[in-house]
Image (cartoon, rainbow, N blue to C red):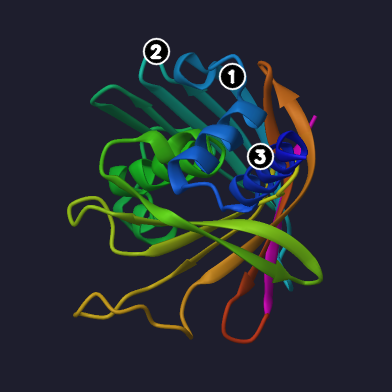
């Protein structure tokens, strides 16, 4: 009888431990293991073809090359009859408009062509398409508490992420499937001058479908919405 009682106690204790929420870092490790099980992101050298569709605008087609070992980033974007190209190779920056490097100051202003924008594109694409692996970058603060939330009828494990002052001021939330740890949504909010979250700010991004690139599972479709009113902003489609 004592033996049976002891076994029941062990089983009950195990259930209690299993029911406890995992920590933020544990969730992140599981998510990375799902998306990049062979740790290939750090040596990523590949091409992404993305079509961006937004309401009341013609689509924009972009060819993006990310070569992390060589510190190379390239984006060729076309909307209607206009093409722009940005190349960042270590500290070198090259810009082209409709294939030409000789660009007038008027056209630079009209099309907002500058190296700051080139770096913005680099940071944007390497961050979003490198998630969740990019959450291991220096200056990223992974909050320990993991919450369970239901979003649009589906349950997720939610990881809160903030950044060191010199890195960024937005507050991010990453939503993962509680069984597979696949990333399903991410969301960000702006903060005020006191660092307090502004609930009517920011956007959320719904991720659907997955493609495999260099053995990394990357979400194919990213649909963007405002947090404040669920207004649809557009979708990025990763094209094979």
Hey, which quadrant is residue 216 in on the image?
A: top right
**Quadrant in which the C terminus is drawn:** top right
Label whose residue precedes the other's in the sequence (1 or 2): 1
Mark 2 secondary-structure assignment: loop
Mark 3 secondary-structure assignment: helix
Q: Nearer the viewer, residue 123 or 40?
A: 40
Magenta stretch: give its range. Answer: 231-240
Residue to which mark 2 is pinned: 69
Disc 1 crowd, CA 10 A, few/some/many (<14, 14-19, 20+): few
Q: Which mark is residue 10?
A: 3
Disc 2 crowd, CA 10 A, few/some/many (<14, 14-19, 20+): few
Residue to which mark 1 is pinned: 46
Q: What's the distance in space between the residues labelled 1 and 2, CA to CA? A: 11 Å
Q: What's the distance in space between the residues labelled 3 and 2, CA to CA? A: 50 Å
Mark 1 secondary-structure assignment: strand
Residue 84 horizontal/vertical position (percent) = 51, 42
Q: Are marks 1 and 3 in contact (CB under 8 Å)?
A: no
Disc 3 crowd, CA 10 A, few/some/many (<14, 14-19, 20+): few
Residue 52 horizontal/vertical position (percent) = 69, 52
Q: Which mark is residue 205?
A: none
Residue at position x 44%, y 36% from top? 134
Q: Is residue 204 visible?
A: yes
Would you place residue 80 above or below residue 63 in this image?
below
Label whose residue precedes the other's in the sequence (3 or 2): 3
């Amino acid at each position: 009888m004592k033996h049976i009682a002891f076994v029941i106690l062990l089983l009950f204790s195990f259930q209690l431990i299993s029911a406890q929420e995992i920590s933020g870092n544990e969730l992140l490790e599981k998510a990375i293991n799902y998306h990049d099980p062979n740790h290939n992101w750090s040596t990523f050298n590949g091409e992404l073809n993305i079509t961006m569709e937004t309401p009341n605008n013609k689509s924009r087609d972009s060819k993006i090359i990310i070569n992390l070992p060589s510190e190379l980033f390239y984006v060729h974007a076309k909307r209607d009859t206009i093409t722009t190209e940005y190349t960042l190779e270590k500290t070198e920056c090259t810009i082209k408009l409709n294939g030409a490097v000789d660009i007038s100051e008027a056209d630079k202003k009209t099309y907002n062509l500058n190296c700051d924008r080139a770096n913005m594109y680099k940071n944007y694409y390497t961050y979003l398409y490198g998630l969740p692996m990019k959450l291991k970058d220096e200056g990223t603060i992974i909050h320990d508490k993991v919450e369970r939330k239901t979003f649009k009828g589906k349950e997720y494990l939610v990881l809160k992420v903030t950044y060191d002052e010199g890195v960024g001021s937005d507050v991010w939330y990453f939503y993962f499937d509680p069984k597979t740890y696949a990333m399903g949504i991410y969301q960000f909010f702006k903060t005020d001058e006191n660092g307090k979250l502004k609930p009517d700010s920011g956007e959320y991004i719904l991720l659907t479908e997955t493609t495999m690139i260099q053995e990394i599972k990357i979400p194919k479709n990213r649909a963007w919405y405002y947090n404040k009113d669920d207004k649809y902003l557009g979708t990025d489609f990763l094209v094979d």
